[in-house]
Every structure is written in structure tokens, then in C-alpha cells.
Amino acid sequence: MKKWRLSLRLFPLFAIALLLSGCGKEGLSTLIPMGTVAKEQADLMLFSLLIMVLVMVVVIVLFTYAIIKFRKKRGQEDFIPKQVEGNAKLELLWTIIPIILLIILAVPTISKTFAHSDTHVAKGDDVIKVKVTGHQYWWEFEYPDQKIKTAQDLVIPTGKKVVVELTSKDVIHAFWVPALAGKIDANPGQTTSLWLDADKEGTYKGRCAELCGSSHALMYFNVKAVSPDEFKQWSKDMKDGPSAPTTASAKKGEQIFKNNCMSCHAVGEKGGQTAPNLSNFADRENIAGFKEHNKKNLKAWIKNPGKIKPGAEMPSFEDELSDDQINALADYLFSLSVKK
Amino acid sequence: MSVNAHSLSQPKQNSGFFSWLWEWLSTVDHKKIAILYLFGGGLFFLIGGIEAMLIRIQLAVPENTFLVGHNYNEVITMHGTTMIFLAAMPFIFALMNAVIPLQIGARDVAFPFVNALGFWLFFMGGIILNLSWFLGGAPAGGWTAYAPLSSEFLGNGMDFYVLGLQVAGAGTLMGAINFLVTIVNMRAPGMTFMRLPLFTWTVFITAVLILFAFPALTVGLFLIFFDRLFDANFFNEANGGNSIIWEHIFWIFGHPEVYILILPAFGVISEVIATFSKKRLFGYSSMVFATILIGFLAFMVWVHHMFTVGLGPSANTIFAIATMAIAVPTGIKIFNWIFTLWGGQITFNTANLYAVGFIPTFVMGGVTGVMLAVPTADFQYHDSYFVVAHFHYVIVGGLIFGLFSGFYYWWPKMFGRHLNETLGKINFWLFFIGFHLTFFFQHFLGLMGMPRRYFTYLKGEGFDAFNMVSTIGAFLMFFAVIVMLINIAYSAVKGEKAKGDAWEQGRTLEWSIASPPPEYNFAQTPLVKGIDAFWKEKMDGKDKMTAAEPVGDIHMPSSSIVPFLMSISLTIASLGFIFSAHDGVRKPALFVAGAGVVLFFLCMLARSIKDDPGFHIHKEEVIETEKGVR
Amino acid sequence: MSSVKDNVTALPLHPEKSTLEGKNKFLGFWFFLGGETVLFGTLFATFVALRHQTSGGPAAEDIFGMPLTFLSTIILLTSSLTSVFAIMAMRDNSLGRMQLWFWITVILGLAFLGLEITEFTEYMHEDLGYTTSAFSSAFYTLVGFHGCHVLFGVVWISTLMIQSFKKGITTVTAPKYYVASLYWHFIDVVWVFIFTVVYLLGILGG
């Protein structure tokens, strides 16, 4: 009987937990966690929320009772309430109870904070290391062990610890994949780190979370989790580089690329390093990190990148290249796949 | 607005626009400076509010193109900076000036001249900052202005940010020192520290926090200034600089700033709730203790703004525990307020509605604050809409509710007329409902993965509904403010005249004198016999304070235009420095800057050389004035 | 001058704190110095964080010379002492003696500034420009801020002394002299920290 009444009282709390866990889109929301770190963070968030809801309930009940019960009623205008100075016992009570609640919260806080910040990699650990560099407004990904460079789409194997080392080429950015783990800043001239893993295959949305300039809001990226075997295959394919263009248009596009784009962009090993590496461009999820991945959007981007991402470094090629040339270039870029 | 202010100025022998203007430009009377702060801050509050509306319009629907990219960043930067430095701070100073000398039984503040200077520096600082809109674009680095974005990557707008805040900050610092000395040295006989009204206590602690926090900002701004204008290397990583230094300096200032803002609101709530419950404040001593403790802890927690910087788990957890500790004194305050209401006889007028509405609203901001103190969970919350919701609950739901409560409460004292209650209640309910609609759902937006400072979100991210609700709420708040403006205009013409003890259950000294108070405040310095001194006298059957001195001549400081001139010269200097960043005009601009600085020091010299003898209001005149008001 | 002398008998024991205005000035100035402490504290922290970031330019141990800075220190410490003598003279109501000691303070302050300018010019010649490295920016900013404070003190005390010929020592002027000397002590204390943190640690290469 007693137990039943207790669970009845706790029901609203569980209801909140349940309600919250239905919040947001899968692959984006922190409330639908898909990795170890995000899960533990969500648990901790929920745990602290429950304590706080408890506090809120106590306050609201006392508060509501007070303002209803003690409101001024007609005919009592001359009533002078008792001038209470205080109450040592009560005051002690509401000093000590919060302290206890905070201690309860502090214990998992400390242990989880240390656990989630542990990015130390010992020799022989089975982890994937990734060096991430933030640029205005795109992300560069380098796998030092696999000797691969790519951009915008971070490919990781499921079920494996991925240690991310962060830095920035220009201003401060922050690397955030809400469904997999919390964020850490990418600071120019310094390295920071975090770790994450993904339970199942899929695409997780990533974003920049530190104001970095005009297109801060568009500095998206994707984390693609694939099976470990697929990842192994992919890293091998990436090292081999993309297959050569086959169609005439794509071949023409390759030439245009060499003349106009390679001072900044690289394909495979060759090319500049100041702009995204395009080796597996055709395999990517989005144009410019957030637009649908099709030739129309690509052409619009090449013509005027600043129109899609205000403040983007890449110059406009509207007046540099003819429509035909841009078509060819798009065909070439869409031939850049490492998938066999 | 000016109509209202005009009706309150005491008519001098020769009226006319210019003598009216001169009077306000040169006043050193704390009551008039309070009004200047109120309307100066009000002006910037409206500007900041319009900026907020622009933000909400842009975010109402996904992939909107109303305000994007750099322009959006300008608006969010100016919204934050304006609301914190140019609206919230002057509103607080308005109440400080209007109330503190009256609450402690003083005829004036310690440094009337510096008081005026403080106001004019704040005001000109705000003007400098807002001039950026017309002179090449506003700052766009966020109100936190993180380097190296602010120091290397953004244009001229950042110079306006740096110098505008530098000038306004100097004014704030002076104001703080003035009130510290006023509260320590100018209390009436019998007004011991443990008899100070709680608003005075919170202002005292706030002033201490300003004194120790603002110089850090001053230095930080100088560093950005030197990096930008003279190619220094503080935040330039290529030459050995370190951008994290700015974050530390900014938050060593910035966190205390949050408490600088909220403590006076705590004070207002304590006064209003006690008055309208007809009860003395429950647990006065623990309230004072909690205020001091919060002030002390304010300097120990700045790293909780920087959990994601990568300082490591040890630093993060230490600061996390310190942050959680703040919940304890804050909790003490909440329960003391509830138990002040308990057993009282509560009148629900607009002032008290805001005060009572403050309690649950602020508790919500407080509990999300504790949630944010958990570092690894903060990795998820940080820079998301969860944080936006949290600090708006604290700053709007806490500070602005407190300030509005204070405005309605002390308005009759400041202006001699009540604000209209019907309009007031419409104002409150619109604002209260609008506020919760706007910000409550932003918690969920954050948890669902929406970062702050994003000028748009994509279709299919699931953010549409909550954002729309938020925008609707913002419009309600906007209408609420319009109702308040109408109320102010209405009351200036038709408002009910206020008695000295305007609410008839005033407890503290300010209610023992006329509304608005005469120039000299107290004809005779009152003798304070306990907490809630005026209430005590009333309970003993008297209708005014026991005097501590016979009626006599009263010495007053003379008004002076020098504070205004000093702020003008610093404005000239600032604009000179700002334009020296443009290559073509570097030399002449630097010359103008130098001239402004020299002018400033000449004003100081003039002030030093010419001693101010002040003037006396004669005994007969005082007796005559006192007759008129009772 | 004679009118000043007539006031002499009325001067209380602590003329700087005998009126409410005087007390306010006295207390307000202490608060101001509290804020100044944070200001210099922040500058020191910045300097300490950046003192090894020489970015290929000269480092502290390469250029700082002990004799010059030691001389500066002695000069500034002495000037602090002379300002104490000036305040003692003020309390004795001896205008001439106060003026003498304050003028000596001003001269010592000017000597200090002269040495500082010499020192900075020398460093400039050794390729330590303001923009050379994070270290150089932090160094010039910290020491320069202090230098500006000294300059302001020199100008301030000088104008007070010029006025003192006309105004003498009264309960109105005494607080001004007093806070000026307080300011001067503060500058001196800051210099002691600069000498230790910037120069001694720099030369030792710690």
C-alpha cells in the first residue's frame, strides 16, 4: 500500500523523463543519445533534472499556499500581522537540505566528468584517433594512423572509442555532435580533446557551437558511423584515392579543377591544404555541409559560395568560368568516389 | 518622456527650453540623476528590445532570410551588450540613486559631482556603442567578444564595442565607489549596518563586486584595443599570444557581473514583499549573510563559463562544486521570501505581482543554473538554447521582474505620482505570460540540439514549433513594454498624486518624507531606532521620524556642467581612436583622440583648482517647504 | 599667505579626516585603490601567462639589466619616503616644509620616468618592439601602465603644490594632499611587484 503510494507520487517525475526522451530528432537530439558519452550525459542531465524538479515542487507548493492563504481579504484592512523576525530551526533546515542534495549531485558529477575527459591513449589501445581542425566555416578531419585526410564527413566505425584532437586554423570553434557526445572548443594554437563512440550505424549531425563569424550557423558537419569492416575498407580505399574520371565531361572537369581549384583544394595527396580535401566528394552527405547533395546545389555553390555561406573564403566563379565549364567541373567532382 | 521629466523639475526663476536643458545637464542632485539613469537606460532598453524582436522574427520560421550572417551577428551582439551594460546597469543605478540616500537618511551621496560624471560616462558610452550602426557597422563578436574573432577578424565595429564599454565601464566604477562611501559614511544616527534596509545591503555588495570586477574588464578591453589598434600580440597566436586569456579575463569580470545585476533585484524583492505582506522581512540576518556569501562566491566560479575550453577535469570539477555551493545561499533567500509572505496580509498590486512572480521564475533559472554546473552535462548544454533559456530566466525573470517591481514600487516616490494599476496589471500579465512562452521552450530547443547564436535552423530539424511559440511570446513581451510606456505617459498627466507614505504601509525611511522628496531630502536628519525605522515610529503612533537635529541651514553642492564636458571629451577621444583604425586618417584621428584626452584632463584640472563652496538652503526656506507638503 | 596663517590655529590633529568631505575622500580613495589593485593584478596575470612567449624576439634574460632597474627602484622607494615626510609636515601645519618634500617627490618621480624612457629606448634598439612578441606587448603594457600612473602622479602633485601657495593647508586641501600621497605609495608598491615579477624573475630566467 505504502509502496504503491510512493510510486504514485514519483509518477510525475518519471513522466517528465519519459516526455523528455521523446524530444527532438534522432541523430541530432541530446535526448536520444546514440553513444556511451551522450548516454551517460543524458542520464546525468535527467538525474539533476529530477532533483531540481523536486526542489521546484517544494517551492511551488509552499509558495502557492502562501499567496492564496495569506492574501488580503475584505474587512481586515486594519489587521497588522505578527512581525516575525525569523526561525533558526527552519532556516537551518533549508540550508542543510540543499547541501545534502548538492552532495548527492556532486558525486556522479565528479566521476563522470573525469571519465568523459579521459582521452589518454595508451600504446596498443584499440581506438581510432582523429585530428579535427576548425576553419571558417568547415571542418577538416585527419586520421593520423590511417594517414587519411578528408573534410565535412567524419567516418567512424561503430562500437569503437574515437579520440578526437581539436585545434583551429583561425578563430575559436567548438565541435559538437549532440547525439554522440558533448562539445569541446577548438582553439587556435592549442589542442583539446574529447572522445565519443556510436552504437549503431547512421549519420549523426554535427555543428559548430562557438560563434566564429558570419556563417557560424552554417558550419555543419556529419558523423557517419559504419561497421568496423566497412570502416577498414573505407580507409583502405581512401588511401588508394578516387577512381579516375571516365566520362568526357568529367575529364574536362578534371582539367578545369587543376587550373582553378587545386591551389586550395586537394584530391588525394595532390593540391592545396587551405580548403576542404575533395577526395571522396561524391560520397559526401551534403553540399556546403547542409544543402542537399546534388549537382544543382554544387553548381550554385561554385558560382557564388558567399550567397550560400556568407563570409565563405572561396571566391565566386560566376565570372571566371562559363556555365559549360561549371557543368564539367560538377561532373568531375561527382565522379570523385572511393566506393568500389 | 521628456514631458514627464519636465513636470518634475523644480521650476527655476527663468524657465525656457535652454535653462531646462542646462539644469538637467548640470545637475548633481541624486534624485535627478536617478531620473536621468531611468530614461537613459529606458532608451537603450527599447533599442535592445527592438533588436530582440528582430532576432525572434528571423528565427520564427526555419531557413528564414530576414536577417542573416554578419547582420544577424551584429544584432545579437548589440542586443546582449545593450541589455547588460546600457539597460540593466543604468536601471539598477536609477534605483540606487533614487532610493539609497533616502533609505539611509542622507541628504545626498558622498560625491555628487562624481555621481553626475558616472551617469554621463555611461550615457556617452552607450551613444558611442550605438553610433557604430551609422559609422561602418556594429560589433559582431557576441557580447562576450571572444578573441581572436574580436581582435583580428572583425571590422571597425569592435572598436566601438571596446571604447563604448570602456567609457561606460568607467562611469559604472565611479558610481560604485560613490555608493560604497555613501553607505559607509553617510548613514543617519542609529542606522547601523544590521539595521540597513535589505535593498541598501544588496546595493552595497553589488558595489563591492563592481569595484573588484570592472577593472578586470577595463584591462581586457585595453588588451583587445592594443591588439587591434597598435598590433600588440596578446591574443595573436602566431606571435605567441593566447586567446584563452581573454576568456579568463572576461569571465572574471563577467561572472561577478551576473551577481552585480541580480543582487539589487534580490534587494527590491525583499523590500516589496515585506511592505505588501505588512510584515518585516523573515530572517533578516540570514538574508544579509546570504548576500555577502553570494558576493564572495561570485569571484570563485568564473570557469563554469569555460568548461568546454579544455582546462581539464580537475579544474572543471573544482569550479563545478564552487558553483553548486551558490545554490545554498540563494535557496536561503527564496525560502525567506516565502516565509515573509507566510502569515502576512498580502496586497497584490503591480509592484507586488512582479515581486511574487519573480519567486517561481527565478527558482527556475536557479535550478537550471545548478544543472549547468555539472561539467560533463554542460558539454551538452553549453552554447545551446538551454543556456539562452537559463540566463534569460535569471536576467529577465530575475533582474527585470525585480526592476519593474521596483519601478512600480518607487515610482510615486521618484515622481510624486502613482502609475496606473489597471494598465500596470495588463503590463504584468502580458509580460509574465510572454516571458514564459518565449523562454520556457528554449530549454528544450537546446536539449534537442539547437546551438545559440545561429541565425537559422534547417527544415526537418524539428525546431520549428518551439521557435514559433518563442516568437509569439516575444511579441507579447513587446506589447507589455508598450503598455508600460503608455502607463508612464498617462501617469505623468493624470496619475494619482502620491502621499509621502505612498503605499500607506511603508517601512523604511524613504516613505517618511514627501513624494517627490524636497531637494534636501530630510529637513532634519532622522534618528533611527531599529530595523524598518519608519514602521517602528508608526507603530508607536507617530506619523514621522524622530529628528536627530534641530532645523537649520542645509548645505548643498552646486550644480556643474563639468561632468558633462568630461564625458564629451572622452567621447571625442574614443571616436578619434576608433577612426585611427582606418588607414587614411590614422594621424589626424590620433590627434583628435589626443585632444580629447587633454581636454578631459583640463576639465579635471579645472575641477581641482576651483573649490566648490556649495550653497545653503536657509532654515526659513526649509520650514516653508515642509509646510507645503504635509 | 597671511590669510592662510590666520587659519593655522583652527587646524585639527588629522586635518585630512576632520570633515565629512575629507572622510569621504579618504575612504573613496581607498576603494579606488582596491579597484586599481585588480587592474594591476589582471595586467600581472596576463604578463605572467605570456612572459615566455618571445616568438623569436629577445627574451627577458637577454635584455634586462640589473643596475638601471635597481636605480629606478631606489629612486621610487625614496620618493615614497619623501611623500611621507610631506604628510608629516602637513600634519604639523608647516606649509613650506610640506611643499619642499612634495617637490622633492615630484623630482624623484621625474627622474624615475627619465630612466624608464631611457630603458625603453634601449630595448627598442635591441629589437624588442611593442609588436615583436606576446612577451614584449605584455611587458610594455604592464610597465607602461605603471609609468602612466607615475606621470599622472607627478602632474597631480605638481598642480596641488602650485595651488598650495594660494590655498595653504586647510581642512579642504589637506584631504587632497593626503590622498595624493596615498596614490604615490600605491604606485610605489606596484613597482616593487614589477621589480620582482618582471625584472628579477626575468633576469634569473625563472
Image: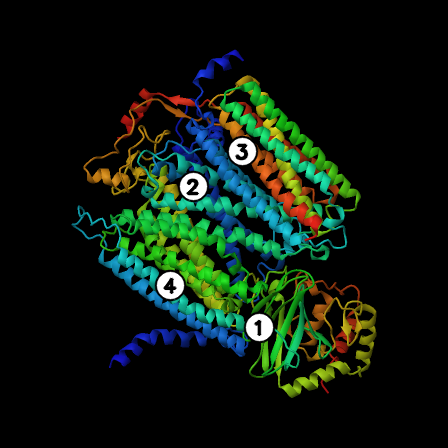
Q: Give residue C1's position: percent from left, percent from top.
A: 54, 13
B133, above or below B472, in the image: above
Q: Nearer the viewer, mark 4 or mark 3?
A: 3
Amino acid at the residue labelled 2 = Ala
Q: State the mark number for residue B260.
A: none
Quadrant into which the C terminus of chain A falls: bottom right
Q: State the mark number for residue C182.
A: 3
Callouts 4 and 2 in the same chain: no
Res. B136 visible in picture: no
Q: Nearer the viewer, mark 3 or mark 2?
A: 3
A205, above or below B536, in the image: below
B279, above or below A261, in the image: above
Callouts 1 and 4 in the same chain: yes
Q: Give residue B30's position: percent from left, percent from top.
A: 42, 34
Q: Secondary structure at mark 1?
A: loop
Contact, mark 4 vs mark 2 (Cβ under 8 Å): no
Chain to which the residue tagged by mark 3 belongs: C
Residue that label 2 marks: B94
**Residue at 64% across, 77% down:** A122
Relative to residue A241, is residue B419 drawn left or right?
Answer: left
Farthest top residue in view? C2
Residue that label 1 marks: A118
Q: Earlier in the sequence, mark 1 or mark 4?
A: 4
Callouts 4 and 3 in the same chain: no
- How far apart are the two marked residues, 4 and 3, measured between alpha carbons? 44 Å
Chain to which the residue tagged by mark 4 belongs: A
Amino acid at the residue labelled 1 = Asp
